[in-house]
Image: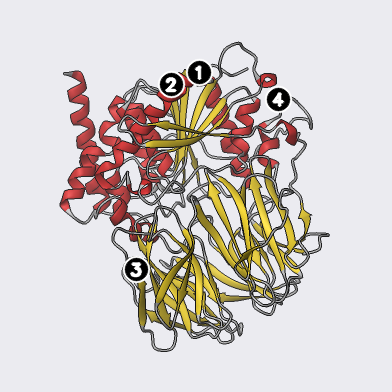
Amino acid sequence: MFRTMLAVSALAMAHSMAAAAQQGETGPDMSLEAISPESEAVNVGLAGQDPSNIARYLLASGAGATGISPDGETLAFFWDVTGEPQLWTLPSTGGQAKQLTFGNGVTFFRWAPDSQSLIYGTDNDGNEQESYYRIAADGSSETLVLPAVEGGFRAFGDISNDGNTIAFSSTERNGEDFDIYTADLRTGETRRIYEGEFGFFAHDISPDGTKLIVTETVGEDSDNLYLLDLASGDMTQIAKPDPRANHGDGGFAWLPDSSGFYFASNERGEWKALTGYNVASGETDVLEHTAHDVESVNLCGTKSQYLVWTENEDGFYSLHIDENGIPLEIDTSILPEGTYQVSCSGASDKISVRVNGWRTPGDVFVIDLGTAKIDQVFASNYAGLDPARLIRPESIRMTARDGVELQGLLYVPDDSSRTEDGPPPVIFLVHGGPTGQSVASFNAVVQYHLDRGLAVFQPNVRGSTGFGRTYVTLDDQKKRRDSVRDLIDMLGALEEDGRVDTSCAAVVGGSYGGYMVNAVLALYPDAFDAGASLYGVGNWVTALQVASPALKASDRIEYGDIREQEWIDYYTENSPITLADNIKVPVLYSHGVMDPRIDVYETEIMVKTLRANGIDAPYIRIPDEGHGWRKLSNQLFYYRRQAEFLEKQLGAAD
């Protein structure tokens, strides 16, 4: 009877929340007790200390997204060593890195075709409403290209080969739908070429400047593919498959004569295969079938003779190069394990490969495809950590109760980090998306937990990308709880495995992963001992109604159309807030006030409900962040407290 009364109470709260969202009630409740970052001395410990201070792990840094200039002489890359992601350059032969930007953190960049300047974007504390700038490659001059527009969420596309025009998508017409625009860099004049509904996104401009590749969002994981005539605004459909497929995530590479382009698509199979499109015939052909997803497709070299791509096998990447259709044999064993991001120069045979791996925060290599020479030009800074002590994940597979094969990455601390006999406690770290994928990339917090004797498991539940076209659809709409149940099946499989102590387990996740924390603790209240939910969903009705335009463009396929009463009723009954009275373990909550994707209201209603039920629910509210922690100062503040919370709950605190 008591449980029934609680359920009715939570259901009433969910209905109240839905009404509040429709009335526009969003934003933080400043009367709610919360912890916020404040100026404090940062204890970093000593270099070589064992175990190392968490600050050392967070201060370990490397190159972010990297692009080689068209002439092959200079590398541009993100680096957050100053506390926010800024734009830096470096000679492609190696040498001293130079910081170009100094203001708000940079969100993207692109080289101009003449290699003399770059276009980049910034927003305001993570609100995702960007301004565009042009800066000289030597940093000596800078101009505002497009100021931010209220309600204008933008997504950059490309720069034309003559360097005069950029293409981008924006919601500035109505604050909701992404249209396709061009802007003249000489005059600043913008032109709306195509008026879209939901999500149409600009990609690569053809070398002759006449056409633009466009995708239309279909769910979180797929898209339809089009070719837009930049003069007339006419749109030609290339691919609009049913069931849905992905064409855009692997990038696009135009042939130099604009007769076609290469890309990756899973339209004709489970895996994203290397595919070509012929403009004249309108036909697409699969060039190479693989057993893994193709990504980072590039056409490189002075004669565009090299086709370069990566393949993703369980979160570990491999590099592939063809020369005029024949595999090029280059020994790439020098590249560390992890994820690879490739960039090509058009006026040389050089490519850059940025590596982010379990032992590599961000190394950059330059490969001369003509000579097969590989040079490391940028090395990660380990902030006094011993990289030899970092732990490699193991890809493991297990079977769910309904027969679906699941996969995850398991990190087990070595004996030197264990202070007690028996298997270590385990933290489940759930990715966002929901169509994200846990890969073998550098994760400072994961490695810190390992150094403290805790195991970490990164599950790729159904709905994750990287495991086939079918797998990513298995959590759609009313199948969402199946993916939550996967966490329980994985916990059971790890119990049978015996390498971790599943009786002492916590679950952590951000964004959609934050929803998964809320959901699994409510649906399976005896499975985990604690949780940490970062900027996650509490009530799907309110979350979907006030989501940012980019999310609304895909949410209707992934979750159902929240404008329809069927889905309002469904999510009113099936949101975590409705079931929150079942949660009986401590949960750490956190959210950025500037978050445009999931409103801070989502976290705060969970905090209020748990506290009203007598459940420990500490809450960290960060005023100057959006959807995630970009700023190093906030990372240092938050993750130290998350680690302390988890260690206390799992009995691993000093």
Tell me which numbered mark, 4 or 3, is placed earlier along the sequence.
4
Helix, strand or loop at mark 4: loop
Does the image show residue 348? yes
Q: Nearer the viewer, mark 2 or mark 1?
A: 1
Name the secondary structure under disc 3.
loop
Q: Amino acid at mark 2?
A: Asp
Most foreground residue, 359 or 602: 359
Marked residue nearer the N-terminal end (1 or 3): 3
Q: Amino acid at mark 3?
A: Asp
| Contact flag, marks 2 and 4 (Cβ < 8 Å) | no
Q: From the viewer's perspective, is the residue at label 4 or at label 1 nearer?
A: 1
Task: Write down the quadrant of residue 328 in the picture.
Answer: bottom right
Q: Position of residue 222 (x, y in %)?
A: 38, 59
Q: Earlier in the sequence, mark 4 or mark 1?
A: 4
User: Within 10 angstroms of label 3, few (less than 14), some, or many (20 or more) residues?
Assistant: many
Q: Give the mark nearer the N terminus: 2 vs 3.
A: 3
Residue 126 percent location from the top left of the image: 51, 55
Whether 630 is drawn above or below 268: the answer is: above
Amino acid identity at mark 1: Gly
| Residue 177 badge | 3
Quarter of the image for the N terminus: give it. Answer: top left
**Residue tagged by mark 2?**
529
Crowding at mark 4 (Cα within 10 Å: few <14, some 14-19, many 20+): some
What kind of residue is marked 4? Pro
Q: Quadrant of the C terminus?
A: top right
